[in-house]
Amino acid sequence: MAEPAADPIADRPPASGPDPAFRRLLRNLRLPVSIPALALIAGVGLSLLAMLQSEQRLHREEEHHFSVRAEEIHAQLADRLRVYEQVARSAASLVMTFPDLHWTEWNRFVEALDMPQRYPGIISIAYARAVTAERAGDLVASMRASGLPAFRIWPESAGAERVINVFTAPVNEVNARAVGFDMMSEATRRSAIERARDSGEPTATRAITLKIDEAAGSRPAFILYQATYRGDPLPPSPEARRAAFTGVVLTPVRIGPLVDRLVDESQLDTGIEIYDVPRADAEFPLYRSRRPPGVTPGISLMRELVVGGRVWTVRYDSFPDGLVSARDWVPGALLAGGIALSIALALALRMGLVTHARAVELADGMTASLRLQEAERQQLFTQAPLGIALIGTDGLVMDCNPAFAAAAGLPQPGLIGTDARLRFGDQASVFALEAALQGESGKLDSDQPLLLGGRRSHFSLHFQPVTADGALKFVLAFAEDIGEKRRAEQHIQYLAHFDALTGLPNRVLLYDRIAQALREARRDGTKVAVLFIDLDRFKVINDSLGHSFGDEVLRSVARRLQAGLRDSDTVGRLGGDEFLIVLRRVAEPKDAAGVAEKMVAHLASPFVVGGQNFVVTPSIGISLYPDDAEDAEGLIRCADIAMYNAKEQGRNGFRFVTREMGAKSRERMDLEGNLRRAIREDQLFLVYQPQVDTLTGRVVGLEALVRWRHPDEGLIMPGRFLPVAEETGLVLAMGDWVLSEACAQIRRWRTRFGLSIPVAVNVSGAQFRDGQLPAKVARALDANGLSGPELEIEVTESTLIDDIEAAAATLAALKRRGVLIALDDFGTGYSSLSYLHRLPIDKLKIDRSFIHDLSTGASDASVPRAIVGLGRSLGLSVIAEGVETQEQLQLLRDLACESYQGFLFSRPVPAEEVERLLETAAAVQPPVRPVSAG
């Protein structure tokens, strides 16, 4: 232990005696009665003053204790309300993440919250969807179709904007009363919803009676609203939020259960009153806790609480708890004791006045010294951020602070008096302590338990000897637990080199592994092979089954790829659905080919994910060092080129890179760059091919086709640039331009000579699956003042069969806008009467391959005849494309095919020639079928 502190009193110089003149004055005073009387009077006065001060101090302490108690309750109430707001936000996030959420899924989500135990006061969690009055009927139909046959909107009379309660959980008879209620029909709810919609934050109503409680009587409650939006969870401005507003999550909360559990109902020492308006303006409180009858509160505190944008006033009252408190007896006891002490003091004053003063001074000094030592000890051992232990010269632990005991994972009392040299868990720590006992400080890190029998972590230890006058007094041992910091560093290092989804090496680590393999190959004279793997049509899995499903597929693929490699080889993920394999010590190219064949075979077995079986095929490109490139960047680039060639050759295979592939890849990259520039600089233009009645020869329609006029290469046909556009995603921007330009041309023709025939526009699979096609078509029609039937949308059969349900919804939205729908390339895919019957299609287009086979004799007319008969039975018109000879036209007339298009009548021509054709030819309006609402 440290040397005891010097005694401040013993070190003080002796006090000088009283002044001789003062002593003579005291000797001459003869007041044996007056001095004790004055002392008694003074003592009684001081006792009274002490009593008053003690009463005031005790009152202040009571106020302080009650203030702390009230603040704790207030903080708990505020925390509970913040948690309820977070519940509303979480429910809103669920709705925005899954817009098509079913009411059964909503009920499972709410039941998992265990509201009665975790969120007292919350009656239910509901979702109200925003609809216009015109779309209210659609909502009713949708809810009834989803399993709520009795769903209705009430009250029936409402404004143009309606917010309808569609989901409420938990499902019970009481909560079901509110289903279908229009929140905008009542002013209080409407005001709160509008504030929630415009702010994006949780918003509360004032105190109301819930619809489910109207029959049972008044039970004060409020509703917490959280708005939901389409797209961005929180649009940047109020105008954007109103435009993206889709509904609100509403959380009705009864105030009584919300507050009751905050105080112990068996003790009526604290009262709570809540007002949702300033207390001076309130007729009665929103909530009042149970309190002793006929008792006036001793202390009252007022606090404000913000609840969903509203300010509550909370009053806390203190009531006696029925027990005798210090305030009841301490002042009186202090007065009685003071008087008694004053009497004793008066009696002893003559005998020991000086001695008494000296004793008081000595006691004050000792008290101050003890308090100083206690404060230093408290600061050293309790507030120190590091663990500290005092080790004596004999190696025994003299003392340690709580931080040291916590780091060791052992109780503090059990460490005092133990031999630290026998308890340290790391031998290096023992050596460092021995050195410190010899006067040498030391630092070290240890991954062993700090003390034997304690917790294991990573510690930083520092031993510092403390000396006085050259002699060792004790050793200070400092211990810091740096385990979390080390684990964080290791995790950061892992994330920097490994893919978070699959656990495979990422791009950074792959480049390092390739560099290592290249150094080894240069030294040993061997080859290195790089296999670039891309999963075929993986985007279809993501688009149709969801990204979480796709992630699980990627993890399964990673496991299979790893299983087929040697320990010396490396497989990693570059990103998306692209993987890379690095093969060391490759003797011949056939070795790399063998690994590629093994990978194709490994992936050929069906995957089972989420209860579904499917096959994922790879396209693999192979490059070799030193044959194709001498660095990692070049090897990966060459393997990438070979992979694209494997895709072009039919996928599900592998290719070695060649010089011709490199040239073709550069040509493709140049074409992609030029195509981007073409879209940006208006190098694209439209041509139109007439569609003709097979019997009368009159033009009954036009098909818009895109062409590219390159400033240097001249005319580039679609067969060359459309595959690049589809592969790079440029087909979306190109399709938007074609749609806008075609509608603008229709408007010009209608203005000039009243065009009465539809113009067909082809839509790619990417456009159709984008989800924005109906909105884009509507904008293009509205911008040109078109009603809808002037435009015909052509969709290929293969695009629709990927997801029949989504396709039906998209086509139904297009039909509601009035456009015509044509099914292109019919007969080449999975033609099915069932989906034709379900989809709102107007026209079937016989693929040109069947028309070509008619004239060459490669097949009979059974397929075209079946298509025409199928179209007639379903009430659809049928058109044949690719008609080039009179013989083909006559065969179509014999089959009763309604119309055709092809070189026999006209090649695709610019808009100017179409105008001359239409001005001289009689255009007819085809029969108009009723536009389907679905």
Image (tube, rainbow, N blue to C red):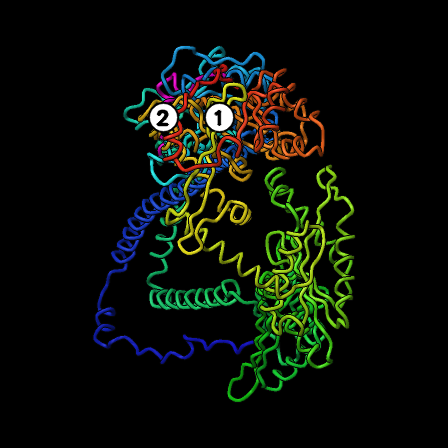
Describe the element under mark 1 as helix, strand or loop: helix
Task: Indicate the amino acid at tag 1.
Answer: Leu
The magenta segment is 180-198
Q: Looking at the rendered structure, which numbered label has been put on residue 814?
A: 1
Callout 1: 10 Å neighbours few (<14), some, many (20+)? Answer: many
Tell me what residue is drawn at x 32 percent, y 47 percent.
53
Tell me what residue is drawn at x 49 percent, y 58 percent.
670
The mark nearer the N terminus, 1 or 2, is 1
Tell me what residue is drawn at x 33 percent, y 61 percent.
349
Can residue 878 be seen in the rendering of this structure? yes
Disc number lying in front (1 or 2): 2
Task: Indicate the amino acid at tag 2.
Answer: Glu
401 displayed left or right of 674: right
Describe the element under mark 2 as helix, strand or loop: helix
Q: Count all numbered tags in the image, as a single digit.
A: 2
Instruction: In the displayed orientation, state which residue is furthest to the bottom.
Output: 470
Measured from the top left, where is residue 429 in percent x and y? 66, 76
Mark 1 → mark 2, Cα distance in angstroms: 30 Å
Measured from the top left, where is residue 508 in percent x and y? 59, 65
142 displayed left or right of 222: right
Q: Give the prevailing secondary structure in the magenta stretch.
A: helix
Q: Quadrant of residue 171?
A: top right
In magenta segment, residue 184: yes
| Residue in the foreground of this view, choosing between 494 and 509 | 509
The residue that label 2 is drawn on is: 919
